[in-house]
Amino acid sequence: MTFNNVVVVGGGTLGSQIAFMSAFHGKNTTIWGRSDGSLDRAKARVARWEEAVKKDIGATDQQVKDAEAHLHYTTDLKAALKGADLVVEALSEDPDVKNDFYKKFSDLADPDTVIVTNTSTLLPSEFADATGRPEKYLGYHFANSIWKNNTAEIMSQSKTSKDLPKEMEQFSREIGMVPILVNKEQPGYLLNSLLVPFLSDALVLWNNGVSDPETIDRAWMIGTGAPLGPFAIMDSIGMKTMYDITKMSTNPEVKKASEKFKTMIDQGKIGRESGKGFYTYPDPDFKKPEFLK
């Protein structure tokens, strides 16, 4: 099956990236948001991705203009789902939010519509029955800045049809991704199974007063040659997602950090997107030559 009509549910950081790159590669794509305000924020994110693809992968103005022509926005869920080949659920890491959407999806979507979840840490099997079509449902996870960090992890659950992973592999290549097939359900897939413990350990060091975020990042960057430290990575992920992840942690030290993230969110420090998180953007300290000296 070829997926030409794509709906992305949620226009947050990754949702807007998935939608933009689908449109960039010629898919008729719609972002659904709960309100006009959420769509305005999605449009602002897409404007940033347009500049990023020009800088990072040499996209032309015409390619960006063509992508804009393929990208649509709506708050009308029934209209968005009508005729959809593929729906990518990219809502927050909150089981109640996802289940509420899946119930609406089950009632409104065409029988043949495939649905996948971009959840970072939850298992697709938790929601398969709620979709009303567990055989047409799997996990589909991306790294941030998907035009250059272009992995698409494909993870089935026990009721997924055997053909769907192959179809998603084809779709991934069509939108410029490298498909990564995960053989067994695993919270966090491959990438986040490695990344989340790394970030969690950095949070524990900070919570316990072992060191501050800048020094922890400096130690990692100098010691490994990595371009970013854990707290700079958290700024890219965003404090809202970090809050959702940490508040569900079984590690009490990590769970404690969720309150720090909530405080930052209340102060408007939601990360790179707002211009302020652990660092201040667009010129964060970790980009300055003296940071590593």
Image (cartoon, rainbow, N blue to C red):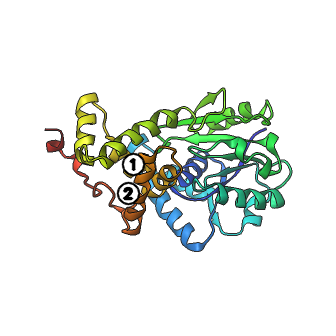
Query: Residue 169: in sight, yes or no?
Result: yes
* Rendering coords of residue 32 (x, y %): 65, 62
Quadrant hosting residue 188: top right
Label 2: how many Cα within 10 Å (few below 14, some 14–19, many 20+): many
Instruction: Tell me what residue is drawn at x 59 percent, y 52 percent.
Output: 19
Mark sitting earlier along the chain (1/2): 1
Q: Give how far apart the Cα atoms at labels 1 and 2 are.
A: 7 Å
User: 277 above or below 252?
Assistant: below
Q: How many marks?
A: 2
Please state which of residues 159 and 251 is positioned toward the viewer in this rendering. Answer: 251
Is residue 50 visible in the rendered image? The answer is no
Which residue type carries mark 1? Met
Residue at 57% from the left image edge and 48% from the top image edge: 18
Relative placement, left or right, of 38 versus 85 is left
Query: Where's the N terminus, which quadrant?
Result: top right
Q: In the orientation shown, which residue stands out farthest toward the top?
A: 183
What residue did someone put label 2 on? 271
Left or right of residue 123: residue 197: left
Q: Tell me the kind of residue under disc 2.
A: Gly
76 relative to 280 in the view: left or right? right
Furthest residue toward front: 252
| Mark 1 touches mark 2? (CB < 8 Å) | yes
- Residue 62: x %, y % from top left: 50, 52
User: Residue under circle 1?
Assistant: 234
Labelled disc at residue 36: none
Placement of the C terminus among the 4 image quadrants: top left
Query: Against 268, is 187 above or below?
Result: above
In what element is the residue under mark 2? Answer: loop
List x then y, in percent, for residue 199.
40, 41
